[in-house]
């Protein structure tokens, strides 16, 4: 016979075990949720902290550039301007655009042209180093990396002398009896980009080399079977697949060449470049000139170092406006393409 007490005892034991298992599962689930919640809180705090560190300089600029210039330097004004004004932008824009109202457009066109040249030449060079098997390929790639490591100041004198007395294998001297002086002409900057010595161009070649190196060889083999030659494979197969790397290189090249005042200052110092104008306008030696201009043209009678700094920062914001607009337009696509460009490979 079956003992009813034994069955009841077994049932109660199973019930207690099930309740214990449910409690342990509930505690484990709650623990996992608390860990995830703590991780999210920590990540949120870290992002907020990094965002504050990055945005802090811009936040400090707001009460400076949007404040009335008579109130600049007042100790009790920290975050909110006492009297909202755009006087600093008016003075800054007059200083930047009084001689040439299209200087920003010319600077943007120059940066875009150099970016297109650097992207095209770097793509061809990177493809050759990644896919074309020729003798000395690794040596050429090592030299490309060496030009990235060597500071540009080390090659500046030789480049300057070469453009000062420019000749191509003695042909120009044979035809005209003399060489050509390319200093203070935009052609010198274009030639640097064409022959791979432009601003940060060795880095661009490296990016393209890494990207093309990671593309499967089956694509080239399929293109050859379909009748594409070397150039057809490059332009019809490789270039369409290299859009992420091309966009990454073009954005970097555009931003760096727009803000360059090193190469342009040596090879084309009289050119219409906003970076040079910004650098020359707000040197310490120009303090008295800007002070007299503010007095005579804008009726700013109170002028000190804080006023000078406010006008300078307003000019800097004006200068960065195209780059900020570009970032907000393409930031999501740029981050995605940057991850696929092979720069970390």
Image (cartoon, rainbow, N blue to C red):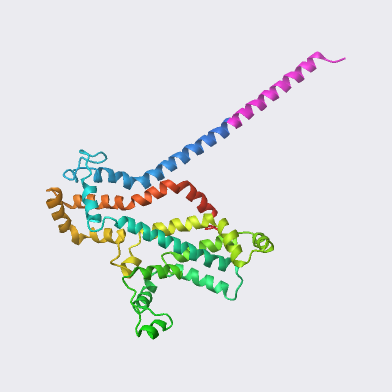
Q: Position of residue 144 (x, y in %)?
A: 49, 70
Q: Identify which residue is drawn at 22% across, 48% down.
A: 90
Q: Is residue 341 visible?
A: no
**Residue 86 against residue 129 in the figure, above or below:** above
Prevailing secondary structure of the magenta residues: helix
The part of the image, by quadrant, that contains residue 264 is bottom left
Between 263 and 221, the one nearer to me in the picture? 221
**Split into 4 quadrants, where in the image is the C terminus?**
bottom right
Residue 317 among magenta residues: no
Q: Position of residue 293 (x, y in %)?
A: 15, 54
On screen, residue 292 versus residue 192, left or right, reads left
Between 302 and 27, the one nearer to me in the picture? 302
Q: Identify which residue is drawn at 12% across, 51% down.
A: 295
Q: Is residue 5 visible?
A: yes
**Split into 4 quadrants, where in the image is the N terminus?**
top right
The part of the image, by quadrant, that contains residue 72 is top left
Q: Identify which residue is drawn at 45% across, 58% down.
A: 250
**Residue 46 against residue 144 in the figure, above or below:** above
- In the rendered image, the residue lying farthest to the right is 1
**Residue 88 against residue 179 in the figure, above or below:** above
Q: Position of residue 220 (x, y in %)?
A: 64, 62
Q: Position of residue 141 (x, y in %)?
A: 53, 70
Q: Identify which residue is drawn at 42% across, 80% down.
A: 168
On screen, residue 42 versus residue 20, left or right, reads left
- In the rendered image, the residue lying farthest to the front is 175
On screen, residue 217 versus residue 258, left or right, reads right
Between 42 and 168, the one nearer to me in the picture? 168
Residue span colored magenta: 1-29
The part of the image, by quadrant, that contains residue 281 is bottom left
């Amino acid at each position: 016979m079956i003992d009813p007490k034994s069955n009841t005892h077994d049932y109660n034991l199973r019930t207690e075990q099930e309740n214990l298992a449910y409690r342990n599962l509930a505690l484990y689930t709650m623990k996992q949720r608390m860990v995830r919640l703590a991780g999210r809180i920590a990540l949120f705090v870290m992002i907020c902290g990094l965002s504050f560190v990055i945005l802090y300089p811009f936040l400090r600029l707001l009460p400076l550039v949007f404040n009335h210039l008579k109130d600049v330097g007042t100790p009790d004004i920290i975050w909110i301007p006492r009297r909202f004004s755009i006087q600093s932008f008016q003075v800054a824009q007059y200083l930047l655009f009084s001689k040439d109202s299209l200087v920003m457009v010319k600077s943007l066109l120059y940066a875009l042209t150099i970016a297109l040249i650097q992207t095209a030449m770097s793509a061809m060079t990177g493809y050759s180093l990644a896919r074309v098997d020729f003798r000395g390929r690794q040596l050429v790639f090592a030299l490309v990396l060496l030009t990235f490591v060597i500071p540009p100041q080390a090659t500046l004198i030789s480049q300057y002398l070469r453009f000062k007395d420019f000749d191509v294998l003695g042909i120009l001297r044979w035809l005209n009896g003399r060489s050509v002086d390319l200093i203070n002409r935009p052609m010198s900057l274009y030639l640097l980009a064409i022959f791979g010595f432009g601003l940060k161009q060795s880095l661009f070649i490296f990016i393209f080399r890494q990207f093309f190196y990671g593309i499967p060889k089956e694509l080239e083999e399929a293109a050859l079977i379909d009748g594409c030659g070397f150039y057809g494979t490059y332009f019809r197969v490789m270039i369409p697949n290299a859009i992420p790397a091309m966009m990454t290189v073009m954005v970097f090249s555009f931003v760096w060449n727009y803000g360059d005042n090193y190469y342009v200052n040596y090879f084309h110092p009289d050119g219409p470049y906003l970076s040079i104008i910004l650098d020359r306008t707000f040197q310490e030696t120009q303090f008295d000139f800007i002070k007299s201009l503010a007095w005579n043209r804008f009726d700013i009678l109170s002028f000190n170092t804080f006023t000078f700094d406010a006008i300078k920062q307003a000019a800097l914001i004006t200068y960065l406006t195209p780059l900020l607009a570009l970032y907000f337009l393409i930031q999501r696509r740029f981050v995605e393409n940057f991850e696929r460009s092979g720069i970390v490979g």
